[in-house]
Amino acid sequence: MAEDRPFHWEYRPEPVVKEIFRVEGGRPLSGTVSISGAKNAALKVLAAATLTGERCRFTNVPEIEDVRVMAETLAHLGVVVDHPEPGVYEVAAGDIDWLFVPLEAAARMRASFMLLGPLLTRLGRVIISNPGGDRIGRRPVDLHVEAMRALGAEIEYRYGYYYAKAPGRLRGAEVSFPQVSVMGTENAMLAATLADGHTVIRPAAREPEVDDLIVFLQAMGADVQRTDPDTIEIDGKRRLRGAEHRVLPDRIETGTFVIATAVTGGRVRLEGAPCDHLGGFLDAVARAGVPVACGKDTVEIDASNVGPGAFRPIDVETAPYPGLATDLQPPTCVLLTQAAGTSRVHETIFEDRLEWLAELRRMGAIVTIADDHHASIDGPTRLRGAEVEIGDLRAGASLILAALAAQGTSTIRGAHHVHRGYENIDGKFAELGARIERRAEEVPPSRP
Ligand code: EPU
């Protein structure tokens, strides 16, 4: 019987279950919370497990939608994926039936493109959907494709798909990126682990998640080293073995809870949260006057004595690690609404990461968006509960922070964006005393 799934050009994303957060703001957070494993590391080690036919086991994997999508994408290729208990995944890519990553996967998650490097280098070919096509928004993958070509791959682009093959093995090479790319670095690194000869990647991204991937690859028997802060060198091996790996803690979740505590005037201890991964974020919050104390794998924030609106205005600029992470720019903007004076924000990495400030304005924030990369925030403002809509993951978490700080009740639509990347965010805030609930969105009855 013919499958009733549409051809890819007829592709329509599956309808998502519409949920909202309802938040009653104005309560200081207090208590202790554990930080989950990092989304942007977990997705990459799951992809890297396809470099071997042997079983790999991962712990501290966050229970989030993006991980579920990656696991499902792997399973559709014929990879065995087990999820024996929360936080644990096992992957065995002995037999892969299909070297094809469909548009469905790419449309749901850009990180599906992380399968290009490992499938190509181990199995010699793959057809993979472009996650940056017009249909699903900008964000090119040219740096990934050029890196594979530098390693000897032949890649053609047809009908929204990259057709990639490696005649024989990929060959070690100099991979020079015109700009730093996190997933570009990771894809090139995965491809080089099974290439013939020596590869040098420069400039290589310095994000802690890249180093976490290196740790896993080394456990698999790969010869990968960071030889300079911005250089990774790899000597390709003929085969890699199965390995175990514990995913590092999520520094973006850590930063999100730091700001949540600060803007509610709370006092919170974060466990399993190493400060030394926070980079320029730590410097930004210190300049703004947030009292943060770093222990070994703990962060304590005590803003209970900082009066409302008493933070200092600052100018911030996002940058590749160790600079201020672009993923922490939206939460930082919420903090700046509580600073006494004008703060300026320069988003250098993405051009659509300031748009959500229009929603923050609905809660009373005084924001001027100068262009796609620059905004200013005047404070302090007393945020008030409002109805707002989440457009993407990090903006979504930030609207929750603003709602926690606001007087009154907020209704935040588009909760599914937040579940993509934050494990049990509403449950964790509730444990800290927040009044937050997640529920199905009520759809108004249609008119007769
Ligand atoms: N870029 C290109 N061509 C490419 C790749 C990137 O022009 O082929 C550009 C991007 O458009 C951007 C810049 O290079 O302007 C840097 O992008 P990068 O490649 O570093 O981003 P990424 O690897 O696609 C990862 C994270 C993002 C995070 C960025 C920056 C994952 C799965 N995603 O994306 O995380 O914002 O690095 O740190 O690791 C998130 O978790 O919410 C998220 C968006």
Image (cartoon, rainbow, N blue to C red):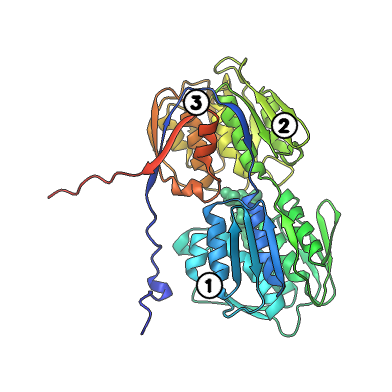
Circle 2/circle 1 CB separation < 8 Å: no
Residue 108 in the image, given as x and y percentages of width and height: 49, 60
Tell me which residue sits at (73%, 67%) in the image. Answer: 190
The answer to whether any part of residue 354 appears in the image is: no
Q: Is residue 53 left or right of residue 229?
A: left
Mark 1 or mark 3: whose residue is earlier in sequence = 1
- Mark 1 crowdedness (10 Å alpha carbons): few <14, some 14-19, many ≥20: some
When asked about the image quadrant of residue 363, the answer is: top left
Tell me which residue sits at (58%, 80%) in the image. Answer: 97
Q: Which residue is mark 3?
A: 405
- Above/below status of 167 relative to 116: below
Question: Foreground: 395 or 180?
Answer: 395
Mark 2 or mark 1: whose residue is earlier in sequence = 1
Q: Quadrant of the N terminus?
A: bottom left
Asked whether mark 1 lies closer than 8 Å to ligand 1, one says no
Q: Which residue is mark 1?
A: 76
